[in-house]
Amino acid sequence: MKVTKQTVLIFLLSLSLISMEIIWSRIFSAEYFYTFAFLILSISILGLGLGALTLRMSKRLAAKESYGCLLSLTGLLMLAGPPAVLYLKLDFTQLLNSYQMLLKLMATIIILGSSFFTGGIVLSSIFRKAHVAMPQLYMADLLGAALGVVASVLLMNGIGTDKAAFVIVLPVFIASFLAFTTWFKAIPALLMLSGVILLPRTDQLLVSAQKDRAEVIYQHWDAMARLKVYKYNDEYWGLNIDNAANSPVIAFDGNFNRPDSLRIPFSIPSTYLTSKFDNCRFLSLGAGGGGDVLMALQDGVAEAHAVEVNSHINTMMTSGFLNEFSGNLYNDARVKVVSEDARAYVRRFDNYFDVIYSLSSNSFAALASGSFALAENYLFTTEAFQDYYKALSPNGYLMMEHQFYVPRMVSEVLDALKCEGVENPAAHLAVYHLPTMRRHLILLGKQPLDGATISQAVYETNEENYAFFRQLYPAADSLQANPINQIITNGWEARQAEASTNLSPCTDDRPFTGQLGLMKNLSLEQVKKRLLPYEFQGFPLSMVIVLVIMALVALVVLPLNLLPYFKKNSNLTAAGWLYFFAIGVGFMAIEVVLIQKYTLFIGSSSYTFMTLLFVLLASSGLGSYFSPRFKTSLPFVAIVLWLIADAVLFPFVVAHLGVLSLAWRIIITCLMVAPIGFFMGMPFVKGSAKSGELIDWGFAINGAASVIGSTLVLIPVFLYGFTYGMVMAGAFYLLAYLLIKKTFVAAG
């Protein structure tokens, strides 16, 4: 294989573009909440296809080979993007009742889309002029993207997300340096130097638009989350995650030998439950700043398992910034510190827990998946509660609290117990309301709960405590009409019609517990109100954002891709146009679903994203290179057959291989994903062979379709599950299979 300059340029540009996308996703997920990051980045990525379309429409631009200038401009726009957007101080909550915010949103999209636009011109220009070498060129594109995935995660974890946003521009400037042939090489050299000069000031350039709630005494920003430590006072600090989730950190001197009068109080104590066991084994799901662990040790448990998916938080607690303040808590002999996804740990733990305890154990941040997913975790699905139930000792308890999800979680608990063959699921369940904390609490027993446990598990359920603690199920006569009691006694279906949020149980195939909004709540009056990032009031924010993106692409971008038909040149036939559209939708739909699905198997962390996307893109690159050796129809048949096999085998893999170590789960994922990736790399090359120099137009169509695919697939996934998303993707590849047999180029 001959490595040409064009191949190197594509490789370096793709490496930077996907890295930029991933890093920007992390930045804006932390600053704007992930649903809004999804909106701005999805629309911005359309710039890639619009750049290719501009090349197709401009004879002058197509005739020139000004890669050096365009690459330097791309790098400059990448450097300027995040600081410029944060300077605008865009407030999404005011988006639909402020013309100023709408203008700021438009400016944000233009700023972020500009580097994709210029990069798209370069990629499509090389594809057009060297289309006969498409197997090698497309391989360089995909392999560059694969390496970019790894580079972005490693850089964010190694030097911080803010610095990574500047360092990742380096490959583009190197490409620009190689593209220039004269003294113009000084342009990218000077731009690289400016990036180096700015590097120490990235924390000042990427200033949050949000006002911090207290003095920030520590910050860390990696591929998992943006962490801040707030100092409220000398006795109480707060660990903030992505400006959304919070975890308390309590000052402790390491002394557990205190009289009761000096014990540290906790708002939701588990003392009554842990005291039932002589050698209690306690599990904290999402231990955060260690409050749960401190409570458990103070209550005298024999073992406390602190499970936290964010490894840096555990490092802070064991030997880092929070160690001394927390009294060296995590180095207590009774504490087992676990940096892993909670579901994965529960599945593979070879013993039982007496008490499983969880306070708001979910992260609102997206997976670092570019703009490809409105991501959630798998902690609150029906199968999750089955896992927790099976992990309890014969007389064990699960105590789980949440602000928003409990009505839906109750439906899942009941389904989970039925699946486990429990005769009377409701007898194992109690639910409480803490109105002053605006929280609900579920108590689940491995055995049916007795009256004493129900009334004393947290606080005494009596008139004296009613103002801050009340029992919703089993409900007193005066509280029989409360929604929780109605769901448990009559079923969620009977309550759904009058409920403002979605009560249907979620499963591992549809793990979107936080998608509480219902389309019946969508109205002009609702749209004009302040857009809260959470859906606990019933406004279907995620679905609305998906529909907005799709409408923009369908009404604006796709019609633009029809403009070349008005030029007097050779044109793509309708079959050729639809072919590139179909494979764009299919590729992105599969990518989105695979990232989400394999999060369950590997665990919710940057490892999942990095592993999945690297293997998928790298294997697609190899498929591209070897594409000419395979018959035209084979890749489409292979993709559809793999999708069928995955639907059948994946539940078996999770159930039987999920107990393996992380390393083995990663290896198995690679072996399962590589085959479909290999064949997914072939259709674009096959289409190129039939479209010739019109491949720049095909690339533009493919770019728009990719954004549609990453959003369109979320509709069946949200409503019915990942299996239906895969069916949709398979249908588009079958359509492409039918179209590939037709003529792609019509004479002008």
Image (cartoon, rainbow, N blue to C red):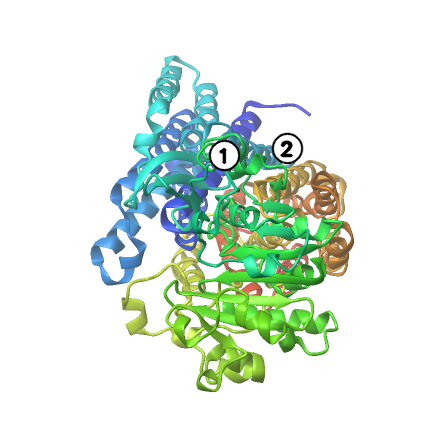
Question: Is 71 above or below relative to 638?
Answer: above
- Image coordinates for residue 143, horizontal then vertical, percent: 61, 34
Residue 279 visible in the current orientation = yes
In this image, 70 relative to 95: left or right? Answer: right
Mark 2, residue position = 136
SS class, disc 2:
helix
The residue drawn where x is 39% and y is 53% is 36
SS class, disc 1:
helix
- Image coordinates for residue 125, horizontal then vertical, percent: 48, 35
Where is the N terminus found, in terms of image quarters?
Answer: top right
Packing grade of label 1 (10 A; few <14, some 14-19, many >=20) is: some
Packing grade of label 2 (10 A; few <14, some 14-19, many >=20) is: many
- In the rendered image, which quarter is residue 3 located in? top right
Question: Is 537 above or below relative to 360?
Answer: below
- Image coordinates for residue 484, horizontal then vertical, percent: 50, 77
Mark 1, residue position = 316
| Mark closer to the observer (1, 2) | 1
Which amino acid type is marked by label 1? Met
In this image, 145 relative to 185: left or right? Answer: right
